[in-house]
């Protein structure tokens, strides 16, 4: 996006949010508290509030600058799909980012109370995002190793994230079905290397023995898990709450059609066999 267009979009986003003085005030931080403790306290405070999705629609103007009006993010993994995510998960991740318990330099300035608002705004926007329908066309991987991906998912991922990638509200474990493959790859690397500070230690141990092939296979399989039909948007759906949003500000032409016969090319050779993923430490 060009700088003028981004600036216009950002100014429109910020103009729609007028938090009260108490709502916009930065939280007082106790130096004795860790970022994780600060985030936990805000999470508990937000979860105790009654959300107002209508105000959440207004607050979401800030989020739409990057996540787009539909909340579908980008297939290239630069932004995740947040539409349809579990509300407690959205709240926890926002609280972690605001407390710097999860490093996200790009999102942090948009999440602070001066811009996004206080706990009530977090409750409201999480409720709004959670009810948005998901894209039926999320980004997926090459599709060459899905049998291995299914095997690895069943052994290492299904217990926490659910057999169908539906997540777990009570444990604020994210739904990962229908998430963009390249975003999953990026977060997997961040979790394994410790760059994502709010990672579940159990998951860090669980994925320690994955080879690059195991990682690519299981995340490609995960990206292809389908959310329930009731959570998916119809193809061509646009968010009616943003009727004036300019969806092609740079005038980039659509992708040209696939050349005839390209899809008839012979399949690639089978990848070499790898040993099974070692069992996770107990």
Image: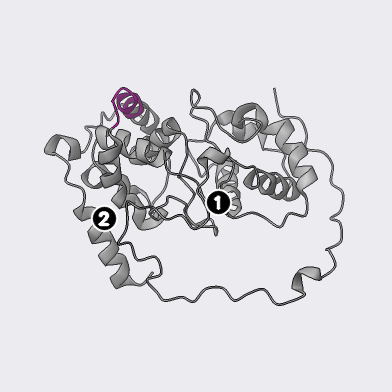
Which quarter of the figure has residue 33?
Answer: top left
Q: Main secondary structure of the magenta part?
A: helix
- 246 w.r.t. 85: above or below: below
Q: Residues within 10 Å of mark 1 (few under 14, many from 20)?
A: many
- 156 w.r.t. 82: above or below: above
Q: Is residue 173 left or right of residue 142?
A: left
Q: Residues within 10 Å of mark 2 (few under 14, many from 20)?
A: some
Please state the horizontal and vertical placement of residue 262, each as a whole percent of the image: 75, 73
Which quarter of the figure has residue 98?
Answer: top left
Q: Residue at x 70, y 32 (%)?
A: 156
Please state the horizontal and vertical placement of residue 210, each as a whole percent of the image: 72, 42
Please state the horizontal and vertical placement of residue 180, each as a whole percent of the image: 57, 51
Q: Please give the label number shown on residue 13.
A: 2
Q: Earlier in the sequence, mark 2 or mark 1?
A: 2
Q: Nearer the viewer, residue 183 or 247?
A: 247
Q: Nearer the viewer, residue 76 or 198?
A: 76
Which quarter of the figure has residue 94?
Answer: top left
Q: Residue at x 69, y 45 (%)?
A: 221
Quadrant where the image shows the C terminus: top right
Please state the horizontal and vertical placement of residue 27, each as a whole percent of the image: 23, 34
Total of numbered circles in the picture? 2
How far apart in space, not on screen, are marks 2 and 1 (Cα)? 24 Å
- 30 w.r.t. 220: above or below: above
Q: What element does badge 2 sit on?
A: helix
Q: How is the image coloured?
A: one colour
Q: Is residue 231 left or right of residue 225?
A: left
Q: Residue at x 50, y 46 (%)?
A: 134
Q: Residue at x 39, y 65 (%)?
A: 247
Closest to the camera, between mark 2 and mark 1, is 2
Residue occupied by mark 1 = 183
Magenta stretch, residue numbers: 41-51
Residue reaching furthest to the left: 21
């Amino acid at each position: 996006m060009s700088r003028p267009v981004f600036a216009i979009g950002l100014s429109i986003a910020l103009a729609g949010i007028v938090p009260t003085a108490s709502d916009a005030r930065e939280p007082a931080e106790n130096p004795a508290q860790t970022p994780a403790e600060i985030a936990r306290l805000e999470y508990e405070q937000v979860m105790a509030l009654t959300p107002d999705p209508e105000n959440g629609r207004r607050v979401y103007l800030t989020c739409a600058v990057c996540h787009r009006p539909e909340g579908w993010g980008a297939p290239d993994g630069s932004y995740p799909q947040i539409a349809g995510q579990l509300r407690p998960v959205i709240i926890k991740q926002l609280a972690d980012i605001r407390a710097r318990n999860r490093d996200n330099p790009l999102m942090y300035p948009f999440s602070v109370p001066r811009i996004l608002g206080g706990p009530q705004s977090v409750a409201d926007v999480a409720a709004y995002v959670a009810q948005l329908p998901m894209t039926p066309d999320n980004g997926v991987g090459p599709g060459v190793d899905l049998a291995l991906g299914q095997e690895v998912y069943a052994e290492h991922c299904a217990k926490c994230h659910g057999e169908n990638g539906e997540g777990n509200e009570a444990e604020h474990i994210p739904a990962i079905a229908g998430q963009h493959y390249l975003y999953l790859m990026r977060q997997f690397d961040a979790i394994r290397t410790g760059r994502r500070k709010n990672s579940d230690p159990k998951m860090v141990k669980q994925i320690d023995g994955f080879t690059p092939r195991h990682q690519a296979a299981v995340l490609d399989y995960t990206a292809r898990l389908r959310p329930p039909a009731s959570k998916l948007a119809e193809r061509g759906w646009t968010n009616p709450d943003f009727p004036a949003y300019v969806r092609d500000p740079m005038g980039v032409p659509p992708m040209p059609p696939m050349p005839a016969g390209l899809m008839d090319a012979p399949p690639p050779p089978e990848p070499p066999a790898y040993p099974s993923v070692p069992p996770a430490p107990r």
